[in-house]
Structures are given as C-alpha cells and as structure tokens.
Amino acid sequence: MLSRVADNLYWFARYLERTENLARLVGASTELMLDLPRHLAPGWEPLLRIAGSQANFAARGGADYSGRAIVRFLIADAANNSSMAASISRAREIARTARDILPRDLWERINGLHIYVSEHADDAISHSGRHGFLTQVIANVQGLTGMLEGVVSEGQALSFLTLGRNIERADMTSRIVDVRTAALPGDQAAAQLQPFETVLWMSVLRSLSAYQMYRIHARERLHGAGVVRFLLADEHFPRACVCCLRRAEEVLLRLPHSETLRRRMMRMRKAIGHSSQEAYEQGTLHEFIDRLQLSLARTNDELARIYFLGEPLAEPAAGSRQSQSMISAVSRDSAPRTL
Amino acid sequence: MQIAWSDYPAATSFDELISAGGQPRAAARALVEYLSALGATELAVRQRAAETAIRGMGIAFTVYHEEGGSIDRAWPLDIIPRVIDRLEWQRIEAGLRQRALALNLFIDDVYHDQLIIRDRIFPGEFLADSANFRTQCIGISPPLGVWAHICGSDLIRGADGTMYVLEDNLRVPSGVSYMLENRQVVKRVFPEVFEASTILPVDDYPSQLLETLRAMAPDGVTHPEVVVLTPGIYNSAYFEHSYLAQQMGCELVEGRDLAVRDDDHVYMRTVDGWRRVDVIYRRVDDLFLDPEVFRADSTLGVRGLMRAWCAGNVALANAPGAGVADDKLVYTFVPAMIRYYLDEEAILPNVPSYLCTDAAQRSHVLAHLDELVVKPANESGGYGMLMGPKSSAAERARFAELIRAQPRNYMAQPVIDLSTTPTLVDGGIEPRHLDLRPFILSGREVQVTMGGLTRVALRKGSLVVNSSQGGGSKDTWIVDTAADHALARS
C-alpha cells in the first residue's frame, strides 16, 4: 500500500473518531451544567482545554466563554482545525481519494454526514436542538465505523484505520480524565462540591459512554480512583487507554518494521496499569497524563516516520507537508518525559 | 405515448439517426423502432433511472470553485445512443490508425533527424516557435519509437455527411472512462436492444491500455510495475484517473508518492518501503512533470523524472514532448505527413484550414472573419477562439490585430455545421449537435476504441459540447448490420 494512502486512512479514522468524541463530550457537558447548581458548575472553558484549543479560541478573538460561543467554536467553526465541521470535511476529502479502497457506500454516507453537519450545526448551538443533532452525528459515525469493521478485509488498510481510531481514542480519554480531575481536588469549592461529586464522575464516564460498562465492571459506589483506573487502565473497555493501546498493538503485528512501536506501546500499557491509580491518589495524575500524552505524540510521529513520510531523501520529493496532528501542537514547559 | 418521428424536426444539418425523409438510418432502425414502441413517457422514466444509476455508481466530474472547494457533478448522459454502422466505422478506424502512425513518426522525426523539414514538407520555423516542442527531448528514443501512446482525436460530421478530424489530443486526452461507464449504464437501461442486435463491445479498453503500457517497459523488465500519475483530487479528470487505475489494477500515485533516487530509477513510497516503478501513465502536463527541468514551482511532478526517463529507466506515456503534434498549425500538415511517411492518402480529411503565416491565406482570413472560426495554435478546450458568425465587430477587430501581430499563433477554419442526433429534452425529443472522441492506443500495435465518447451540446442550436460548459454525453454504438441481417435470414 502506498504510504500516502496509509497516512490518509489513519487520519480518516482519527477524524471520524474525533467527530464522535466531540459529540459525546459536548452532550455530556450540557447535561452536567443542568445537574449542577450554577455557582458550582465548571463552565465551558474546560472543553477548550480538552480539545487543546484555548490558544486558538483566544486568537480567534474569543472573549465570550458562554456555552453557545464555545459550542459554536467546537462544532461549527470551520476555521477551527479541531472542530467537528473541520474534522468531517477532512474525512470526506480523504474518502474521495480512497474510493477504490473504502467500501463503495461509505462515500455516500460520509458525504451525507458532511451535508447534515453543515446544514444543521446551528441546531447544536441552540439548547433545544443540541441533543437531537449530537445523537444524529454519533449514530452516523457509528454507522460508518460499523461499515469499516464489517466489510473491510483484515489487511493493511484495516490496520491503519484501526490504528487511527485507537490512538485518537486513547488521546481523547486521557485528555478528558486530565481536565476533569484537575478541576476536582484542591479546588476551593471542593467542600461544597462533595454532594455533587458523584454527578461529576458520572459526567466524565458519560462523555466517554463508559457509565454502563463501569457499573457492570465495578459494582460499587462511584469513586474517583475507580473511575480513573477504569478509564485509563481497564483492559477490556474499548475507550480505556490500555485497551486502545492493546488493539493498536495487535494490528501492528500485521505491519512490517513495527517492533519498536509495539515495544513502546507495551511499555505504555504496563506503566498505566501500574501507576495511574497511584498517581491519582498522590495528586500527580496531571504529570502522569502529561507523560502519557507525550508518549502518544511520539507514537504518532513514529508511525509517520516508519510508514508515511518515507526515509529522508537528499532532495525532498514534494512540497512541505502540514502537521495534521492535534497532539503535536501541545507545548510543554518542563523537560519532556515519556512513560 | 408514441414517438412520431415524422415530427422530428429535419434540420439542415446531417442527423446521425434519422435521414432527411424522417426514416431511420439502417444501423439505427432497431433502436428507433424500439424507442417508438417504448414511448416518450417510459423513455423519461428510463432517463431518470439512468441518472439514479450514475449517482449510485459515483460517476462524476469535478468542477473547481474557489469558494466551495471542489464539487463533484453527476456525469450528464443522454440515454438515446448515437449509432454508427460497422462498415462506416471500419473506414474511420483505418483512418485513425493511419493518423496515429504518421503522428508518431512525425514526433520521432522532429526529435531526431528532422527529415520532414529537410525535405521541405514541414517548415522548420514552425517547430522553433512551437509552444510544445521540448528541446530536452531531442535525441531521446522511447521504446518502440512511440511517443503518443494514447491519442484522443475529435471527429465531427459536416452537413454532407463527411466525417472530419477536428483535432488530435496528444498530451493528456481524457474522457475514455465516461465512454466505458456510459455503456454500463445504457446496457442496464435498454437491455432489450442489446439482446436483439449486434452492438460491438467497448469494455476491452482498460486491458488494451495496460497491455500498451506494459509493452513500453524498460529492457529486461519482465513484470513491470505500472502506475497512473494524477495531479490529485482537484483535477477535473480525477474520477477518470482513479477509474483507470482501478480497472487496470495499478496504483494511483501523486507526484509526492514518487522519488528518483541516486540510481536514477523511479520509486514509490509504500508501507513496506520503496518499490521501483517502470511505467508511468502520467496525467500531468509536461511542464509540471519535473521541477528540475520544467516549471521549478511545480509540486505535482517528481524531481529527477526527466533524468530517469532520458536514461531509459522509466517509460512515460505519453512521452514528454509528444504535444508538439498537438498544435493547430502542425494539424494542418497531417495529410502531408501521411503522404510523406506512409506514402498513402489520408483516409479521414482535416477540416479545411487557413494558415495565417501565409500572406494570401491570411488576407482571406482577415476579409472573412465574420464567417470563420479563428483558433489559437496551442490552446485546448475551446479557449481563446473567435466564433466569426456570432462575434461582435469589436471582437473581430481585436482578432484582426492579434493575427497581424502573431500570425504563427492563429489558424482559421470555416464553421462546420455539426451533425445532430435525437436527444431527450423537456417535452420530447429534439436534434442536438454532437462530436465524437475515439481513443487510439499505440504500442506494439495500434488499437482504436470501438466507437468513442460522443459529446452532445444540450442547448438548442449550440455547438459547444464540453461538459464543463453544459455539454452532455451519449453511448456510442457501433452496430454490425451485416451480422444482424444474416441473423434475420437464418
């Protein structure tokens, strides 16, 4: 398979997954705002942090941190690189170039989703239309993902799609856990928040569609350490980081030159399994997730180096390439340390 | 509702299906009778079914808009086919074969000994001024001496029924995928007619193209890696590039997938590493092929590609420089080339043409601007033309000046009243003007598509058939009436 095609398929899966994740995140946050008393609600700004878009939002002249403004920015703003509208239109462009590899009906469906989002994104901004819009988007993306799972043979194409989906998932899950836990301990409102803590943790789970599976898995009262452990280290929940990494590792087995990548992923899985709960309990979860995020970014770069960009040429074959990565845009103050 | 062909307006133009008396031509008889029985209402239903099928099959062409990005438009197909008798087609085919042979000999000659100039058949100064003559190609000998492996020649029929060659497209001619897809759709729409008569198949093209490309492989390569090089998804013919790659089972690559490495071979970057490429069917114009040699700002090409090609390490179809024969002035010399290289008379005539470089012809052109079509020598797609009868005095004055300033850049032809064919329009069937683009493959042998892509002007009276300007298309049937008669007798 051509490297460019592999690169495209990987990003196609990431954009689709990002779309679904954004829809869940906005949906769960909307509910959370309704459940919490106004003076305790965390506001909408954390969503920008989760999406890694604070700087971009500010640069676009955003001084209005209302729900409407932020939801518009995250869903409908085509100029925001990580918005839902931008993700879908890039996924659609890729599907156009890969029509001979992707299932035939997929093009029509992604095209339909693109039209739906461009015509109805305003519904998401209004409170009353939001739920219906998000539900529709999630159902559509799941339909597309199901189509890929259901009819694409287990070859290189499916490997890159699976890699993209799982790396995007691990990235998003770790971001949500990071931002949401950061808001909890040490907060001056912590004492007041106590009665609502359960609501908060439920919201975290819901934004990853993890509530029901957590209930089945945990069979105990919701508590922070349990949720963090489940979302980061569970081996079987498809959106838990460890599970995403295991799935990525499995498909890497089918690709050439993947030993280093697989070793890196195994290291990450072990580190998460050993240390994530402890990090939470000791108040160092943020630093821990920082390192996890950095490792994911390295994984992404490594994939690009091995499969997408090609070995360095004396003279580059073509024009420069834009970084499509949301992760690599994240800057770090302290010296980079991976897991 | 029955279709009354007696009401079909008999125009002054030649009609491809209906003769002057309102009777169907022999090769079209079965079709016309079938359409009559079907009736206009059912025909409209089938047209809609065809349009649904086209959307479902994803047959599209791309129109680029600055604001909305690129838009895929469904391919416009009129379901009433255009019919040509096999006997007539055999003559046309022979004419196209002859033309492709002569054109390839001409290109090879101008990049080597230039005998045709020495023998004063073709004026050397025309070559020096040609926008598509590439000095970088001088002395290069591509495999089999073939430069224009894929040629798309546009044929038009005049009022007296004569089939003329209007132009030869030797750079990156497009449209063949639509010829193939049109047949797929029309077979679904009119299966009964295909059962009842001998309509010759067109589906061979992708395998013939692959065979032609494989035959060009560098010496010693027994299993050549053939790829299709596209400028990318914003190109209006992207659908065709991806369609042909898929049909031939080749990779569809962009310039950035390829690299010429230290050994002067071309490689493509795959997940498993570099893989050598032997033959490239390039759909990128000469000037964008290699920034090292041509336009330095091109990001569509491959740095070093010309080096690899000159070294004989990779074959390019069409060869760089083949466009030299795709010049409207060179076109006027094709009958002379056929005489010179093949010692034959041209089977298919050119449209009569006036050269503005010749003083007598130029003054004729300047005196008759209101009757003639004036064409720039090196443009394609109908750009920069003057349509005399429809022009304003100001436009004619501007062209007169252009012609006097740069006579080499212009030629003129009488307006040909293009033939028509019955076409579905709102409220019935009316004649519309059309042309025909067959494709000629030159490799070890010369092969011509069975028919070609028929393009039709959908607006009443219009002579513009380009799909980007509101033109449509038709399936083209080469009907073996002799076989059908024999079948009927037995």
Image: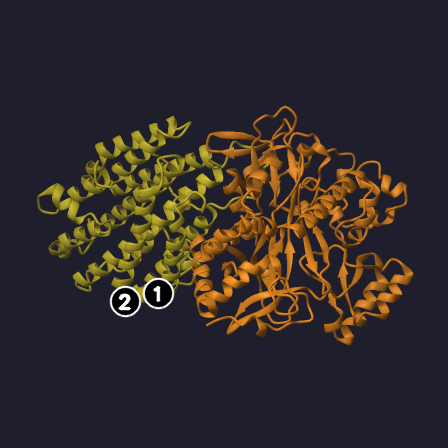
Colour approach in the figure: by chain
Q: Nearer the viewer, residue B396 or B38?
A: B38
Tag 1 or tag 2, which sits nearer the N-term? 1
Image coordinates of residue A26 in percent, x first then y, are 28, 57
Kind of residue at badge 1: His
Image coordinates of residue B345 in percent, x first then y, are 81, 47
Image side of residue A259 versus residue B361, left or right: left
Chain letter for the part of the structure drawn in orange:
B
Separation of disc 2 and disc 1 at Cα? 9 Å
- Image-quadrant location for residue A232: top left
Chain letter for the part of the structure drawn in yellow:
A
| Element at label 1 | helix
Please tell me which residue is depicted at 59% across the width and 25% down the height of the picture: B222
Residue of label 1:
A120
Please tell me which residue is depicted at 91% across the width and 61% down the height of the picture: B359
Image coordinates of residue B189 in percent, x first then y, are 46, 57
Q: Quadrant of the C terminus of chain A?
A: top left
Residue of label 2:
A129
Mark 1, chain letter?
A: A
Work out which residue is located at the far left of the displayed protein and give it.
Answer: A220
How many circles with numbers are drawn on the protein?
Answer: 2
